Image (cartoon, rainbow, N blue to C red):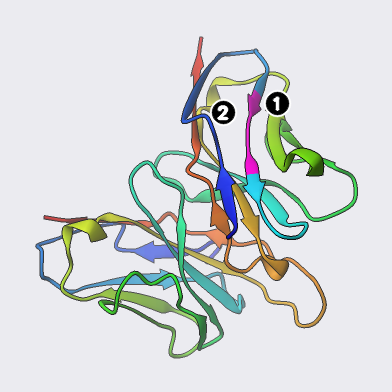
Amino acid sequence: AQSVTQPDIHITVSEGASLELRCNYSYGATPYLFWYVQSPGQGLQLLLKYFSGDTLVQGIKGFEAEFKRSQSSFNLRKPSVHWSDAAEYFCAVAHTGGFKTIFGAGTRLFVKA
Amino acid sequence: GAGVSQSPRYKVAKRGQDVALRCDPISGHVSLFWYQQALGQGPEFLTYFQNEAQLDKSGLPSDRFFAERPEGSVSTLKIQRTQQEDSAVYLCASSLWASGGVSYNEQFFGPGTRLTVL
C-alpha cells in the first residue's frame, strides 16, 4: 500500500537559517510527489511537484525539493527561512493524473527570531 | 469565484445530528475531491467526482457519510447521525481534468469546514 512518512512532527529553526523537511514514500512505481503548505485557517497550497525528469525541482516561495529514488525520499529545502514560513508542511504522493492523493501526517515548522 | 469556497467554515453539532457541508469548486473544474483532516494529521481522501459521477468513494469511513454533486458543480458532503469521531476539518479540492494520457491537474483546496461534534 502506498504511504508517506514525515519523520519529524515539528521542527524549530532560526530565521535566516536553512531548512530541510524530510519525506519518505512507499509506492510501487515512480509516483507523483508534492509538497503542500497549510497556514492556520488557510487551505492547502501547492509548493512544488515532481513528475519526472530533473530530480531537483523548484517551487514557490524559494523552496526546492530533491527526488532520490534510491532512498525513496523527497526532502524539502529552503536556504534561508523567513518568519512567514512558519506553517504546517505536508508531503504527498499521487496516482497518475493526480487523483487520490495520499498525504503524510505533516511537519509543523516554527521559526524563532 | 476565484478559488474553492466551503460553507459553513465552522459547524458544531450534537452527537446524533445530521450535518451538510457545502463545496463550491472553481468554475469550470471538472474534478472534485473531499478529504477529512483529523487534528494533527494529514488530509485523508474520502471521495472523488468527475462532473456529477462519483468515481471513487472508497475513503468514506461509514455508510453515515454521503456525498453528491448532482449538477457537476456544487458538492455536498452529508454526515448522518454524527459521532464524536467525525470531528475534523473537511477539505474540498477541485481540479481541471484532462482526458487521455498521463497528466496531472493541480488540486486547488478550499479553506475547509471545521466540524465539532459534542
Q: Residue A78 carries which label?
A: 1
Residue situated in front as seen by the camera: A80 or B81:
B81
- Return the x and y of residue A41 as percentages of the image width and height: 39, 44
| Image quarter (top left, top right, bottom left or bottom right) of the N terminus of chain A | bottom right
Residue B84 falls in which quadrant of the image? bottom left
Q: Which residue is drawn at 18% across and 68% down?
A: B82
Residue at screen point 52% across, 67% down? B1
- Seen in the picture, residue A111 relative to A36 is either above or below; the reply is above
For label 1, the SS is strand
The mark lying in front, picked from 1 and 2, is 1
> Residue A67: in sight, yes or no?
no
Nearer to the camera, A29 or B117 = A29
The residue that appears at 71% across and 39% down in the rendered structure is A73
Label 2, secondary structure: give it: helix
Of B70 and A69, the residue lying toward us? A69
From the viewer's perspective, is residue A109 above or below residue A103?
Answer: above
Say which chain tag 2 marks.
A
Q: Give yes or no for contact between labels 1 and 2 (Cβ–Cβ under 8 Å).
A: yes
Judge whether residue A105 is colored magenta.
no
- Residue A96 vs A8, above or below: the answer is below
On residue B77, the disc is none
The quarter holding residue B99 reads bottom right
Quick one: label 2, few (<14), some, or many (20+) residues within 10 Å? some
Which residues are drawn in magenta? A20-24
For mark 2, what is the residue?
A: A85
The prevailing secondary structure element of the residues shown in magenta is strand
Q: Specify the amino acid type for callout 2.
A: Asp
Q: In the visual, does A33 lie left or right of A44?
A: right
Q: Position of residue B85 (x, y in %)?
A: 23, 57
Answer left or right for B30 relative to A62: left
Name the residue at 58% across, 76% down.
B31
